[in-house]
Image: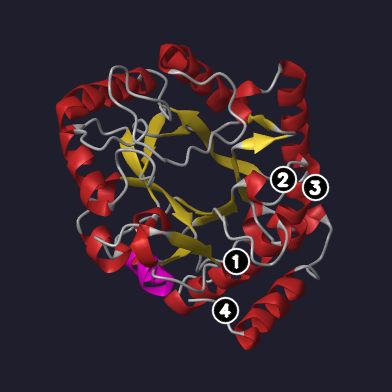
């Protein structure tokens, strides 16, 4: 369903109120994080803008965040930045006293070799250049280098573009994920598989199966209830979430979605849609989760990515407060 005019105006007002927070970085120390906040509240940087300095200013000074997730900036995927751009990104992060939750890489968001493509599939690469199967081992090594550059220990990955029938290839895909996790373990890095509707692990049920098949303890799930919610076969919370091994959740994306006729879907602000975010956040707290809850807005109903992200962050903070985890 869509936001009512009243709900939209209330969300907009809340987002505007956040913009009046103090703009001095000295007030944004990690000591100021509320004791009631068990999560690393963050936002994926390019959900606001491709201007990385502006993004970090909004995240730290307006939204009051201490964490940020890196995906693309200056119209380049984070994995394609050159040495000068990497140094500039580091400088900007330090300027705004922001820490990095993970490298949101496009690793394994490619075709599985020899498998037939699924027709009509949406394929968003987020500015990743030249990403094909033959380059994935080198990309993984580069992502590990980026964890050192940005002082994080997490890399987000996928499990290849979705197939109509993945059964003939699933064992080999799992073996590739296990191999990647083993490579990451040598550098004390955690590999996060995101459940993604356009890839072979989309729902909580599918994620639980992959985690069982790939038991490496540094192989964890980037749980995205919004992505799972695009499938009519699953209610992300509580049904999908209840299937997951809670000690294998290592990251969480926050967005919302409504289902449309014919299997279609529409992204929504966090406060509207099929995902019960108050219940989901309460359950994460109950189950001892203490890593990132990162806004991946996707919804653009406010006209611009930034305006839409401000509204969704206001929704997310409201849900956090209602769940007992004010951040």
Secondary element at image label 3: helix
Q: In which quarter of the image is residue 80?
A: top right
Of the two numbered discs 4 and 1 in the rendering, the one whose residue sits closer to the viewer: 4
Which residue is found at the position 31% from the left and 66% from the top? 237
Vertical position of residue 113 compared to residue 24: above or below = above
Of the two numbered discs 1 and 2 in the rendering, the one whose residue sits closer to the viewer: 1
Q: Pointer 2: what residue? A: 97
Q: Which mark is residue 312?
A: 1
Secondary element at image label 2: loop
Q: In which quarter of the image is residue 116?
A: top left
Q: Residue 69 carries which label?
A: none
Q: Pointer 4: what residue? A: 3
Which residue is found at the position 23% from the left and 27% from the top? 174
Q: Where is residue 224 in the image (x, y as percent from the top left)?
A: 40, 53
**Residue furthest toward the right?**
24
> N-terminal of the two: label 4 or label 1?
4
Q: Position of residue 63 (x, y in %)?
A: 69, 62
Span shown in magenta: 275-283
């Amino acid at each position: 369903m869509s936001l009512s005019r009243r709900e939209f105006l209330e969300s907009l007002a809340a987002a505007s109120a956040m913009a009046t927070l103090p703009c001095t970085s000295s007030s944004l120390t990690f000591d100021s994080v509320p004791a009631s906040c068990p999560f690393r509240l963050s936002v994926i940087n390019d959900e606001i803008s491709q201007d990385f300095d502006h993004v970090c200013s909004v995240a730290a000074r307006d939204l009051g965040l201490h964490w940020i997730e890196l995906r693309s900036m200056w119209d380049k995927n984070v994995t394609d930045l050159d040495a000068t751009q990497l140094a500039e990104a580091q400088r900007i992060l330090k300027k705004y006293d922001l820490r990095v939750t993970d490298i949101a890489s496009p690793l394994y968001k490619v075709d599985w070799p020899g498998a037939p493509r699924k027709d009509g599939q949406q394929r968003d690469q987020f500015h990743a250049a030249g990403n094909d199967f033959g380059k994935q081992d080198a990309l993984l090594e580069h992502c590990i280098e980026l964890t050192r550059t940005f002082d994080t220990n997490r890399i987000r990955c996928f499990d290849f573009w979705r197939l109509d029938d993945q059964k003939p290839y699933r064992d080999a895909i799992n073996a590739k994920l296990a191999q990647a996790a083993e490579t990451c373990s040598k550098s004390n890095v955690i590999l996060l598989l995101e459940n993604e509707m356009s890839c072979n692990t989309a729902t909580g049920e599918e994620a639980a199966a992959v985690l069982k098949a790939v038991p490496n303890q540094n192989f964890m799930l980037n749980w995205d209830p919004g992505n799972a919610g695009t499938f009519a076969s699953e209610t992300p919370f509580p049904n999908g979430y209840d299937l997951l091994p809670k000690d294998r959740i290592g990251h969480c994306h926050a967005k919302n979605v409504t289902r449309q006729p014919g299997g279609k879907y529409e992204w929504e602000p966090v406060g509207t849609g099929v995902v019960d975010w108050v219940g989901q956040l309460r359950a994460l707290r109950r189950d001892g989760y203490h890593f990132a809850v990162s806004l991946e807005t996707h919804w653009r109903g406010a006209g611009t990515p930034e305006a839409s992200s401000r509204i969704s962050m206001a929704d997310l903070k409201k849900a956090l407060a209602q769940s007992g985890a004010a951040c």
